[in-house]
Image (tube, rainbow, N blue to C red):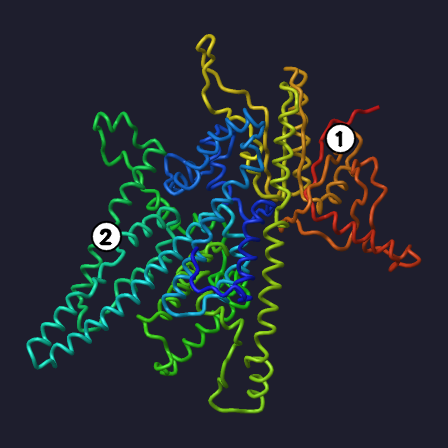
Amino acid sequence: MQFQSIKPKDPSLVSYFILSFLRIVLVFVPQLGYIHPDEFFQSVEVVAGDEYGLEVTRTWEFNTTFPIRSMAITYFGLKVPFSLLRFASMYSNYYLGINLRGSYVTLVFPRLLMVALSFVNDWSLYRICRSYGLQYQFRLLTLASSYVMLVYATHTFSNSIEMALCSLLLYTVSDCMIHSNTVIYQREFLEEKYRKAQRTVEKVRFYKLKMSLPSHSLNRCVLMATLCVAGVFNRPTFLLFGMPLVFHWLLRGMGTKTVSFADFNLRIMIFVLSAIPSLVLFIVIDSIYYGYLTMAEIERQEIGINNFVVTPVNFIRYNIIAENTAQHGVHPLYTHVLVNVPLLYNVLGVLAIFSLLSMIYRFATNDYTSLPRAQSFVGLMLSAIFFPIISLSLINHQEARFLIPITVPLVLLHAPKLQVGLSSSYPFKVPSRFKDFLYHNLLCPAVSPKYLLKIWYTANVILTLFYGFLHQGGVYQLAEYFSRQVDVRSSNVHIHLVTSHIYSVPQCFVGLPSTETLLVNPDNGQKYRRTKQFFLYEYGSLELEQLYRKLKLLVDVCEMRSISANQRYRLYLAIPSSLSERLNDIFQNRSTAALIKHSQVRVFYPHLSIEAMPQVFGQHPCGINTDVDELDDTCPIYALEDEQNPFSVGRLLKQFSSVAHQFGLILYRIEVRRIK
């Protein structure tokens, strides 16, 4: 990014560069937080399985019979870099003994690509501010301090790619708008001068000046069309984010003397034609990847309509049915506006919502003069924010990450309010004592920036720690642990891992070779597949009683196989440590006829599952060993009557230790209880 006329002593820019460096550092730390399964199972899990031949979980979205996820963006964004990494790993492993295919590299390397892509948002915001003469220093600082950029933008979400494409499209449209406005103003000025000129020499001069003006009507049409196609194939919801931007590009200059409705139609036609090359390219990539189109068919020229698949069309066909989206969760219509926007942008989101309500009130009271023009810069930003929010609110499945593409226009419009206050002047038409108090103690520039900035920074620090490190933070550590276990185990030992109340475990971090790949024995040419030796059983938020029964059944099956086929095994259970008390009770309350027991292997910190929130009151094991035979050491958080001094330092420390222990993911070894 090239900054012009940067003042080295500008505190906002210094802070911005520090936060930008922090954004990169947090990738290497790395962030253990696991926001949503889609950040792995729609990208890294699929690409690592294809490129490295690993045992992975391919979700239903990549089903070849009805694929709804395009691999075109993922191919260029992850598969090609993974191929280069695999090539480099051969030499680094051979000459330096450094493995570039371990769990850490598989996690960090894609995020490095994402953090590089995230700076497209910074660059776009900077260029827009420079084009329109806006102060960019504090806006850049606000953008960089948002946890959306520190966490969401650096994780491998398709939404993060969508945000970068939307920001680039927003800059392209805004730049075309100001360029068109300048050219149109100059053309109309010269035409007026031409009509008023009395002498032929003056008319010729003005005519030549008018003809020398640059063209503007179709500026960057190919770039915009390509961005829109890439955005739709990345996530078809890009239609809702890109539609108002493209519409403003089409409307440039409408209503002036030099731009007519014919120009509007011409722009549409050229835009559609410009999208065809990239559209064909993306369709061909997906068709080849999913096996609809093969090189043999291309060579024989046996190609028909059934040889192509258009994944965005499948995506829309699937999501347009309410019953399908309801399977992923049903949310009220107001979730995006009242929950997700404040969750993502805290005070900025609240300010944006109130600004919309204010404009609706002005429109209802016929105060049209205070409303922004539809073709203005403010009109562009408002439509870029609220059109997708309102459109996505009509879908019954709503997640906060769906809205992150509105980050740049939101910061552009409302970030200065964090610095200058909610209201630069007295906002009320009719003064009163209460209104005066409200203005001088809450809204005025001398008061409001102080608490607005405190709320903004505090909320973003907390949410960065929560989503970046705490939320489901033990899942990656669990996968990395088993990547080491499968390396040191005996070849005839099968590992069984049962999980409950946590997100799905990405098997690409375990690093096991795929059992689906067909191999050939070089000695005799016989084809074979590897034997599956790692088994993963994920039970979501299953009740612990039912989980115990499944464990008992699984132990019985493994014991039978160990006797009949001499097949050794290890059975593990991973659950949030906040559930360990209840699990211990279930194991302890079983009769001695129950032949299974559990012993703690280790705890992965930090970890928090919303499905199993920690309990501040109650009892929780304090010791390291949680075998049911050794459960005497507990922390009775609630029952303090037997303590002479319930507020003693030792007692409080013990309570704190008990609560802190619940912010972990605990791994148990499940074994047969031998009757003595």
Pointer 2 local density, CA inside 10 Å: few below 14, some 14–19, many at least 20: few
Q: Which mark is residue 608?
A: none
The kind of residue tagged 2 is Val
Does 55 sit above or below residue 128? above
The kind of residue tagged 1 is Ala
Pointer 1 local density, CA inside 10 Å: few below 14, some 14–19, many at least 20: some
* 332 sits to left or right of 589: left
Residue found at the far left of this picture? 200
Question: Which one is closest to the eye, mark 1 or mark 2?
Answer: 2
Residues 588 and 655: in front is 655
Residue 211's spot in the image, x, y percent?
Answer: 15, 66
The residue positioned 47% from the left and 57% from the top of the image is 404
The residue singled out by tag 1 in the image is 594
Q: Secondary structure at mark 2?
A: helix
Q: Mark 1 or 2 closer to N-term? A: 2
Q: Could you tell me which quadrant the C terminus lies in?
A: top right
* 371 sits to left or right of 595: left
The Cα atoms of the two marked residues, 1 and 2, are separated by: 69 Å
* 105 sits to left or right of 131: right
Does 346 sit above or below residue 593? below
Residue 533's spot in the image, x, y percent?
Answer: 59, 24
Q: Could you tell me which quadrant the N terminus lies in?
A: bottom left
Instruction: Please give the count of numbered marks on the rendered protein.
Output: 2
Residue 7's spot in the image, x, y percent?
Answer: 49, 66
Is disc 1 in contact with disc 2, using a CB cutoff of under 8 Å?
Answer: no
Residue 617's spot in the image, x, y percent?
Answer: 77, 55
The residue singled out by tag 2 in the image is 272
